Amino acid sequence: MATALLILGCVVLIAEWIHSVLTRDKADDLSEEQQ
């Protein structure tokens, strides 16, 4: 059970990181277009 929770936690952290990277890339693209 503890292992399953640990894996789930890692998956959530990775998902959050990927989401932040994708949103940051989109924001950078928008800012470049505005300049």
Image: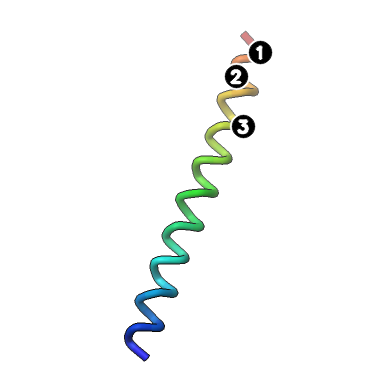
Which percent across, then down, holds residue 12? 46, 65
Is the residue under label 1 in contact with that under label 2 (CB below 8 Å)? Answer: yes
Residue linked to disc 3: 26
**Residue type, numbered disc 3:** Lys
Q: Residue at x 37, y 91 (%)?
A: 1
Q: Residue at x 40, y 83 (%)?
A: 4
Front residue of 8 and 23: 8
Residue linked to disc 1: 34
**Residue type, numbered disc 2:** Ser
Mark 2 or mark 3, earlier in chain? 3
Helix, strand or loop for disc 3: helix
**Residue type, numbered disc 1:** Gln
Is the residue 26 above or below the residue 18 in the image? above
Distance CA(mark 2)–CA(mark 3): 9 Å
Front residue of 13 and 4: 4
Which percent across, then down, holds residue 27? 59, 29
Mark number for residue 7? Answer: none
Is the residue under label 1 in contact with that under label 3 (CB below 8 Å)? Answer: no
Q: From the viewer's perspective, is the residue at label 3 or at label 1 nearer?
A: 3
Quarter occupied by residue 29 = top right
Which percent across, then down, holds residue 21? 50, 41
Colour scheme of this structure image?
rainbow
Front residue of 19 and 34: 19
Q: Residue at x 34, y 83 (%)?
A: 3
Which percent across, then down, holds residue 17? 45, 50
Answer with left or right where residue 34 lies relative to residue 3.
Answer: right
Q: Residue at x 48, y 55 (%)?
A: 16
Q: From the viewer's perspective, is the residue at label 2 or at label 3 nearer?
A: 3
Mark 3 or mark 1, earlier in chain? 3
Distance CA(mark 2)–CA(mark 1): 5 Å
Residue linked to disc 2: 31
